[in-house]
Each structure stands twice: as structure tokens, then as C-alpha cells.
Image (spheres, coloured by chain):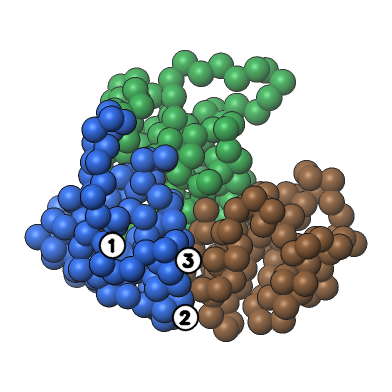
Chain colours: A blue, B brown, C green
Amino acid sequence: MDEMESGVVKKFMFVNRKAPYGTIYALEVLEMVLISAAFDQDVHLAFVDDGVFQLKKGQDTKALGQKNFSPTYRALDGYDIEKLYVEAESMAERGLTPADLLVPVEVLSRAEMGALMNEMDVVLTA
Amino acid sequence: MLHTVNKSPFEKNALESCLSHAVEGASILLIEDGVYAALGGTSTAARMAEAAKRFKVFVLGPDLAARGMDAGRLVEGVGIVDYEGFVDLVAEHPTSQAWL
Amino acid sequence: MKIGILVNEGPYNHQASDTALNFCKAALAKGHTIWRVFFYYDGVLNAAPRAEPPTDDRNLFKQWGELAEKHGVDLVVCVAAGLRRGIREGDTAPGFRISGLGQLIEAGIQCDRLVTFGD
């Protein structure tokens, strides 16, 4: 593909602000993230506000009839997507600690998250 | 960075989240139901007035008009743009971020 | 300037499609290029075939199609999101084409700006 040979590397950030299952955004953002891995870009995932709920351990969707896609977050490093950032204040507001999360992440303060967002070339939100 | 916010502050936290992440020098454009955040005489007016000192804040005029609100009701420091102005804001800032 | 657009919501239920259209028209009038509009999530429903909005309401399907026809705007519907919602190759409103999510990432790489409209 031509786009993979363009040599341009931009800083992409996928900003997750919504909880899983109640809406489809979390799942389809994840599908977008997986595709982005093929383009050799500098990919960042941010989890803020209700987005932190996407990473909660122990999700069990059997009774919903929906697919539990949370294991995919653990598979991201296999796609060389390793820059996962979770916001400390968003977790604290929701009674979560890093021990509640299903994947190792970097915890940033809200101010640090804002500064990181400001460095991006392309920000995709849903 | 140009931030766009399209939610009423009375319903969602998109504006509050935007304001607490935006860095100095950022511009914020309120569109769709986001324009309600720019109105004076509301419970959010003081927050917006303070934000308008730190950031360049704009509302999308057509969305304001559609909702029966005129410029006289806006918090001081908030500017009005039309769709052309929206395009100019996008062009002026290297990155756009939508708070949905 | 080369501008890419991401539309996250379908027509009518949310204002996103209207705002995106008005933005695109203004950008084109100012001499910018709308390099691609990518439709994702329920945004794929902007390409629904056989939709017939009431005649006294705006026809968003038609307006998007006119953008493609008159200005050569590339309207791309995500194949996976489309299949999930019954929008498929050869059965879309006129002016749209179906392709992969890579087309969105490519727009992010190639365009000077990427602007998202959603809910």
C-alpha cells in the first residue's frame, strides 16, 4: 500500500471517553486502533472520563449476548501498540486504582494528559 | 489545538473535560448543543467567563440562532463565528480535537 | 489546505451529519480541498440506499452525493461498520464507496487537518 511507504510518521491519539457495552464506541475505536498498527505511525491510546471503565478487569458479557472484547487490550503490544495512558483523576473519581485494570498502563495526571494531547498531530475521538 | 464541544454542559461533562485538558493558547469552539455553555445567567456562566480568559472561546452562530439565542446573551469574551469562521479556526490550528 | 473529515453518526438522529456537511461546503467555498470524508460507527448510515426523507425536510443522502458529484469529494464508508449495519458494496446511496478503516488512517496521515463530527 502506498500509504505505508509514504515515510510520514505522525503522532496519532485515540481518545477513549466512553464506557464499553452501553454504546459501541469502545469496540469500534479498538478496531480502528488495530488497523492503525499497519501504518507505522506513533500511536497513543488515552483513557479518560468513563473511558477508564473499558480497562476494568473481570468483564463478563455472557448474559448480554455481546462479545467481551476486553482481552484485546492485552493483545495490543503484539501489534507494537504500547503507549496506553490512563488518567489518574478519572480513575479516582470512579473508585478505580491501577490494580483494577486488566493491562499495564502509564498513569498520567489530568494536566499531563492535557499536555500529551497537545503534542498530537491527529486526535481521533468517539 | 482547536477543541470542539457539541454537548450541553447541563447534560454531559464534555465541556468540563475539555476545559480541564486544554492548555494555554488553545481555542474552543462550541457547536450544536455545546452553544448553551456560552450563555450568561446560567449556572455555568461563571465557569465559562473564567475559561474565556484562559482560552479563545467561540460559538457557532448558526447553532445559536437555531436555538433562539442571540449574541446579547453570551458570556463576555465569547466570540461568534459562522461556518466559514469554523473553517478558518481549523486552518489556524494544526490539530482539532472533538469532545463528543 | 487538505482537510479530512470523520463522521461518527448517522443522519437525522444527531446533528453531526448536518454540521459536517455545512463545514465541508464552507471549506470548499473558501478554496480548501475536502480530501476525504470517512463514515464510521453509525456514520455509515449516511450512505443508506433507498432512504426517502419527507420532501419538506433536507435530504442529507442527496447532499452528500452532490458533494461527491460536484466537487469530487471522496466519500468512504467503512466496510466493517457498514456490514454490521446493512450497508454494503453496490448497495449504497449514490456517491459513496466502501473501503477499509485504513482509508481513515491514511486521511490522518495525508491531510493537513482531520476534523471529527459525532455525538
Give me the C-alpha separation between circle 2 and circle 3: 15 Å
* Residue at which label 1 appears: A100
Residue at 34% x, 23% y: name it: C86
Give me the C-alpha separation between circle 1 and circle 2: 22 Å
Pick whichever of labels 1 and 2 is earlier in the sequence: 1
Which kind of residue does numbered mark 3 sit on?
Glu
Q: Is residue A50 visible?
A: yes
* Residue at which label 3 appears: A93
Q: Sort mark 2 into few (<14), some (14-19) or many (20+) by Cα contacts within 10 Å.
A: some
Which kind of residue does numbered mark 2 sit on?
Ala
The chain ID associated with circle 1 is A
Residue at 78% x, 62% y: name it: B43
* Residue at which label 2 appears: A111
Q: Is residue C8 above or below residue A98?
A: above
Q: Is residue C58 left or right of residue B18?
A: right
Which picture quadrant has residue C73?
A: top left
Place of residue B97 in the rendered image (x, y in percent of width and height, measured from the top left): 49, 63
Place of residue B79 in the rendered image (x, y in percent of width and height, measured from the top left): 76, 68
